[in-house]
Structures are given as C-alpha cells and as structure tokens.
Image: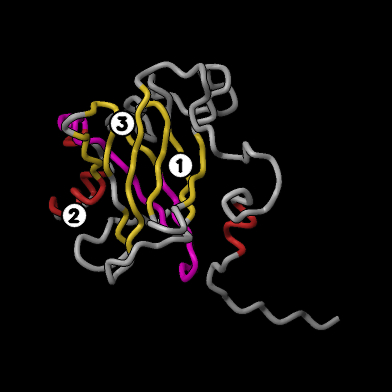
Amino acid sequence: MRPLKETPSQTAGPYVHIGLMPGAAGVAGDAHELGHDIAGPDAEGPRIRIEGRVIDGTGTPVRDAVIEVWQANAAGIHAGPGATVEPGFRGWGRVATDPASGGFAIDTVKPGAVPGPGPGERMQAPHLSLWIVARGINLGLHTRLYFDDEPEANAADPVLSLIEWETRRATLIAARAPDNDALYRFDIRLQGADETVFFEV
C-alpha cells in the first residue's frame, strides 16, 4: 500500500469558532458551552475581570480569535489529578473575541503564586497562561498575563526574567483600573509596535 501524501498546512479558518465555541459561532446548542466557567462558583479568592482586545500588526482588532486560559487557584494550585482545589474549580476556560470590536473579557479569580517547575526553583508570580488562535495563525500562540499590582513577585518571576529587554516584559503585564480593584486591562498585540511576547512551548 502506497503511503498517503501529507496534507498541506492550512490557516485556522472560520471553523475555529464552530469547533471550539459553537455558541459564539451561532450554532444552536448548550448555552453553557465548554470553557465559559473558569473558576466555578465556589472558588476562593478575589473575583476579577480582565478586559482587552486582540490586535493585528496594522492595529486592527481581530474579530475571530479564540483565547484559552489556564490558571492556578488563589492558593497557587492547578486543578488536576491529586490536586486539592475547590469543588468545581477547573482553572481552564475559553473566550472568543467580539465579532464587532475584537474585544474579550475573562471572569475568574485572581490566581496565587505558583511553585517553579523543579526543586529549588523560584516561585512564579500570579499569572494566567494564554493560548490564542485565529484565522491566519497556523500554530496557536502561547503567552502569559501577569498583574501590575504584584511588582515584587513579577520581579522575581523566573519566566519574566528570561525576557532580556525589560520594556518587552511590559507587554505581559495587565494594568489594574484606577477606579476598580477587580478590573484589569490587557491587550494582545500579534505584531508591530509593542508586540506581545510569545513563547515556544
């Protein structure tokens, strides 16, 4: 039997929403589609909201992006086998950008500091891990979101410290609203000036 030819690489097309977020694509189904509830109703810690936009290299909002979120709970524990977290806490979710504005919003609890990946590693500052996919992106983009009201933890974070230029680190910092302690602003810039730092994972 002759081996089949490799399928050519394709960009992520309109099917991204249909497959990952059918409700956002207007496909009838469960109103509570997978990924809407990141923390669950019983999660401890302060509730926060993160608002922002996904922006391309020309400054145009990306209106068909999907953002997946992973995070620890307020005690710095990720959900998973053997983990002791609050009932219903998944620490994972998915949001879509608004088809009109390119904006997005993430409602969750503020995560705690997380131990480093190995023995003796420094603590990682409170953060969200993000994965972005949209039409025109062949491979999902991995980045992180840190909080500007955690300056000491951010300064000691081993991942942020890997970024040589401190001005580039600022692209990963969400700014707390001056009039609302529970609201943060974070834009994801795919290219151009102030491009968000993305990681190879």
Cα distance between the residues tagged 1 and 3: 13 Å
Which residue was labeled with disc 3?
126
Q: Distance between the residues labelled 2 and 1?
A: 21 Å
10 horizontally vs 190: left or right: right
Give the SS element for disc 3. loop
Whether tag 2 and tag 1 are in contact, CB under 8 A, the answer is no
Q: Mark 1 points at which residue?
A: 69
The N terminus: image quadrant: bottom right
When asked about the image quadrant of residue 127, the answer is: top left
In the structure shown, which secondary structural element does the residue marked by tag 1 occupy? strand
Q: In this view, does 71 lie to the left or right of 188?
A: right
In the picture of the structure, the residue carrying the numbered disc 2 is 168
Residue 53 belongs to the span the image colors magenta:
no
Q: Image quadrant of residue 192?
A: bottom left
Classify 10 Å Cα crowding around label 3: few (below 14), some (14-19), many (20 and above).
many
Q: Nearer the viewer, mark 1 or mark 3?
A: 1
Q: What element carries label 2?
A: helix
Pair 2/1: label in front: 1
